[in-house]
Amino acid sequence: MKTLLNQILIFLLAGLFSCSSDSEQGAVNAVDPIDPPENFPNILLIIADDMGKDATFGFDQGILKPQTPNINAIKNTGVSFQNFWSYPTCSPTRATVITGKYGYRTGVKWAGDILANSETSLQQYIDNQTNGRYKSAVVGKWHLSGNTANFNPLTFGLDYYAGILGGSVQNYFQWDLTTNGSTSSRSGYTSKVFTDLAMDWVEAQSSPWFLWLAFNAPHTPFHRPPAIMHNQGNLPNYSDGMDPMPYYLAAIEAMDFQIGRFLNGLSQQERDNTVIIFMGDNGTPNQAGQSPYANNAVKGSLYQGGINVPLFVSGQGVQRTADDFSLINSTDLFSTIAQLAGVSASEIHDSKSFKHLLTAEGNHREFQYSEMNAPNANKWTIANGHYKLIQGSDGLEELYNLESDPYETIDLIPPGLSQEAIAEKEALEAALFNIFN
């Protein structure tokens, strides 16, 4: 077991994490057969920024919940994936979705890491595989190219981009808006402006569209949204030292208000022909984290509170209203969205489509994986739905039984492992070896 861990450490230190194999690039360039022409659905991907299960309706984690009727409706009319894993911070999750690759392949393993424009994006892949059937846009938070417009998101094959390039804004009401490479100062509440821009873009489309709508809410700074958008009462302006929770919840409620405004702005025909995907990009920040998650087990960690986040899918073609416990990686959204757009291939890179789970129960992954580039060490984790292994380049090893200990309070390694746990750990390490090789 130590030999295998040493092999993984050598692989990490060799600098292979930022490389993509020629075979993978070839898989993107080869055009797969596509489904026959039909009324292909519009695809709406909504990303909430720093919204964990403890801040989301319908999960047992957390006590204080925002009022989110529109997000609730997405959940209640479709499939809620209970075992969806993201990355611990913003940029890597977005990179896995847009490339279908684990972070060690792209070099994006922490907030602010830059995605090379040599990567083939989900939007480019769909465009190549379907002969340009879809129009694509990203509106809102990008966080994959640094903070300047010199690295234009349009280089990733988008038809339209408008939003913030970096990870956050200093002021939700006064901020810099980048539109197709041009940046200017903008006033107005970000969640509303993003929604306005998204609605304007959709209204101008005559082809099937794929909209990536990435709110920066409820990411810090904590603030008081416009009163009409939230239900947290008469909040004073936020200042340091105040309880951030009502402001955090208010930002989620304001985002939900805007999601409802967007959906209600669609014609009934267009809404009926739209698949809606709602996801969190990582867990709740520690300032707003709730029990049963410990303070060190939220955003920025590989514990469940940092990476096991909401994922709901509803709308056109979704025939189930259920909780699904399949193991899902954020990479899997790449192939799933591509299949929704008519691409035949169900697997590419590190992505496996779960489109079949939108219509019936079924099997998906045996393992799920996440990772992070911590300040002093690389760390990674793998789980099989029963046991979860966390390791680090600094020698860290932790093993948890998620069935009996879902919030990772008892590390099984220090007291000595049972024969069952030894076998499970070895199986997880073997799966890690396959991932890295």
Image (spheres, helix red, strand yellow):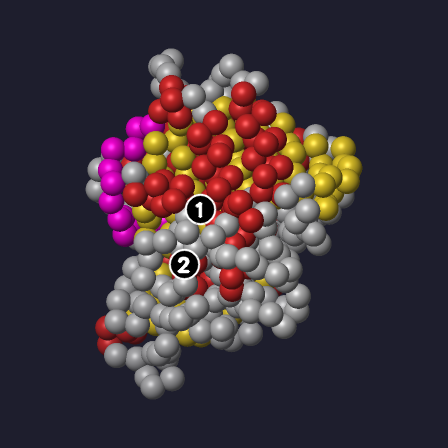
Query: Which circle marks residue 326 in the picture?
Result: none
The answer to whether residue 329 is magenta is yes
Dot in front, 2 or 1: 2
Residue occupying the point 63% across, 72% down = 241
Task: Name which residue type carries label 1.
Answer: Met
Which residue is disc 1 drawn over? 279
Task: Name which residue type carries label 2.
Answer: Lys
Answer whether residue 369 is visible to the viewer in this image: no
For the N terminus, the quadrant is bottom left
Comes first in the chain, label 2 or label 1: 2
Query: Where does residue 10 sit, x and y in percent of width and height?
Result: 56, 65
Residue occupying the point 63% across, 47% down = 143
- Vertical side of 54 occupied by 395: above or below: below
- Vertical side of 239 occupied by 232: above or below: above
Question: Residue at the front extreme?
Answer: 234
Query: Where does residue 179 sit, x and y in percent of width and height?
Result: 70, 32
Question: Residue at the left extreme?
Answer: 361
Q: Nearer the viewer, residue 158 or 320?
A: 320
* Mark 1 residue element: strand
Answer whether residue 153 is visible to the viewer in this image: yes
Query: Which circle marks residue 65 in the picture?
Result: 2
* Mark 2 residue element: loop
Q: Nearer the viewer, residue 126 or 436?
A: 126
Q: Residues within 10 Å of mark 2 (few under 14, many from 20)?
A: some
Q: Nearer the viewer, residue 1 or 225?
A: 225
Query: Where does residue 432 sit, x and y in percent of width and height?
Result: 42, 59
Q: Is residue 177 left or right of residue 225?
A: right
Span of residues in magenta: 316-331
The answer to whether residue 93 is magenta is no
Residue occupying the point 66% across, 66% down = 239
